[in-house]
Amino acid sequence: MTAAARAQTDPVEFLYQQLMAHATGSGNAAAFAGMIATRCGGGGGLPPWLGLQPAAFGCLLEHLFAGAG
């Protein structure tokens, strides 16, 4: 199954693809997109906001995924 097909049925894959569509080119973007998408989907062992204060998490999102909101 292709990534596009998975994104249609898997909300984690959909969020990952959306984040990567806004990636700014940072070398860690794919890793962070995976962590964020997994966490939002209820998986992973990371705390909310990846352990950052909400404002710092927002800055991280904007830095890695400009315009993704």
Image (cartoon, rainbow, N blue to C red):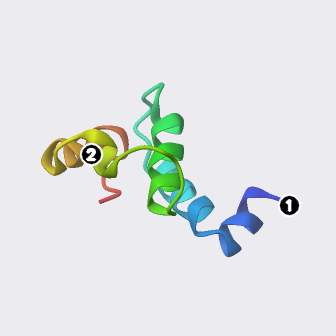
Q: Which residue is rendered at x = 16% and y = 45% of the image?
A: 53
Direction from residue 26 to residue 49 in the image, left or right? left
Label annotation for residue 62: 2
Q: Which residue is rendered at x = 46% and y = 54% of the image?
A: 39
Figure quadrant of residue 51: top left
Direction from residue 49 to residue 23 in the image, left or right? right
Looking at the image, how many numbered discs can be counted on the residues? Answer: 2
What element does badge 1 sit on?
A: loop
Q: Please tell me which residue lies in front, 12 or 69.
A: 12
Q: CA distance from mark 2 to mark 1?
A: 31 Å
Looking at the figure, which quarter contains the N terminus? Answer: bottom right
Residue assigned mark 1: 1
**Residue 17: x and y, percent?**
57, 56
Q: Which residue is rendered at x = 53% and y = 53% of the image?
A: 38
Figure quadrant of residue 68: bottom left
Looking at the figure, which quarter contains the C terminus? Answer: bottom left
**Residue 29: x and y, percent?**
46, 36
Figure quadrant of residue 14: bottom right
**Residue 25: x and y, percent?**
45, 32
The kind of residue tagged 2 is Glu
* Label 2 vs 1, first from the N-terminus: 1
- Tell me the crowding category of disc 1: few under 14, some 14 to 19, or many 20 or more residues within 10 angstroms, Cα based: few
Direction from residue 43 to residue 4 in the image, left or right? right
- Compared with 44, 27 (above or below) is above
What element does badge 2 sit on?
A: helix
For the view shown, which residue lies furthest in the right direction?
1
**Residue 13: x and y, percent?**
62, 60
- Tell me the crowding category of disc 2: few under 14, some 14 to 19, or many 20 or more residues within 10 angstroms, Cα based: some
The kind of residue tagged 1 is Met
Q: Please tell me which residue lies in front, 39 or 19.
A: 39
